[in-house]
Image: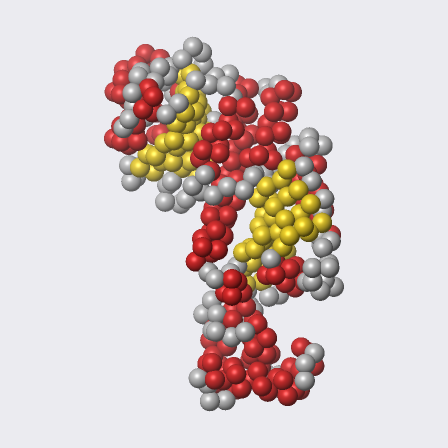
Amino acid sequence: MIAHGQYDAFVRLLPELYSAQTLETFPRHILDLTPRLIRADSYAYNETNFARRRFEVLMRPAPEEVGLADLDTTLASLMHQHPMVLHNRNTDQRSLKMSELASRRQFHRLELYDMAYRPARIEYLMTGGFKLSAAGDIVTLGFGRQPRDFDEGEAEVLNLLRPHLQQAYRNADAMTTFQRQLEFREQSLEGSANMAVVVVDNLTIENASPLARRWLATYFPGRDGSRSNDQLPDLIARWLGYWHAAFNRKHSEVRPCAPLTIESPDGQLNVRLMETRGEQSILLLTREPTGDDPELLERLGLTRREAEVLLWISRGKTSREVAAILSITPKTVDKHVEHIQQKLCAENRTIAAAIAWTAFRST
């Protein structure tokens, strides 16, 4: 049902859809893009929750421009009679036209029509979106027209967009968390953050934080983490190359741009494509520690090296064994142990090891 030109426009739009956004900027960003896919007289980004009678809407043209200054309040008070809201709360939010639920006569009889849609000169509606939370929050895009209804091709374009819209929202949520971490943590506390950014140009690392380089060195053996090693790991390069090709319409079908996940015994590294323009991309790395991870011990106030020493001590290693593992001298290990005991107020290394064990089990 989708014309070649419609699909071509959809694929061209995807790189911009996935460009780095926060939850604050995401709704306006989406409203800037959707007119390039589906033409309408009005566009809306809605977040609703029927149980809590929550209806938040960002609309273009702005509600006050069409005499609807209190649109959020009006829709929240009348959402119990909104056929599309009632339908969406119990479905997967696939694209839906008002004409599929009610005739024009039935639509005109609703108080909802007189209070919201008649002033905005909206006779035909189409929505589509995704479930935001188990608590019943839903995100939908709304399209309004006066002269004619939406056709099946436009409905299918909206259905194509839905999974990408959901993934872009998740990316925006991750970027919001990352920005909050930057706002509230000093650079000296970078080790306690669980996110880092890498800027890539033509599959080469153009810029990366020390934390990002350390993670790449950890998850891809053979890398030293230094600035001289700017070649992107092969797995990430192939993953990124796939999405560059997809966004350049070299694949017949474009799937949602889900994160690349790399597993290791000590944790999971997620790589998200936050923005891509030409050969330049921005990657957001997030790390989810599992098992016995030295980064968890840094939260006890230890340095990175002290955390590594305590990890091996908690596994029953002697100072000589720890020295061999970390390529340092036994005397240096003992010095680290002394500092660890002081910081943890531990009388001996056995108690320090017990503190480490407790920290691992409580995460």
Residue found at the far top of this picture: 147
119 or 167, nearer to the observer = 119
Image side of residue 13 versus residue 252, left or right: left
- Where residue 150 appears, as percent x and y from the top left, is 48, 17
User: What coloring was used for the rendering?
Assistant: secondary structure
Residue at image location 51% in from the left, 16% down from the top:
151
In which quadrant of the rendered view does residue 245 lie? top right
Q: Residue 270, relative to residue 61: is it above or below?
A: below
| Residue 97 point in image, percent of width and height | 43, 21
Using the rendered view, name the quadrant where residue 183 is placed.
Answer: bottom left
205 over 292 or under it: above or below: above
Indicate whether 199 appears above or below 129: below
Q: Is residue 15 left or right of residue 57?
A: right
- Image height of 262 relative to 33, above or below: below
Q: Quadrant of residue 43?
A: top left
Residue at 31%, 24% in the rendered image = 64
- In the rendered image, residue 118, in percent from the top left (x then y), is placed at 31, 16
> Which residue corresponds to the image point at 45% horizontal and 11% vertical from the top-left?
148
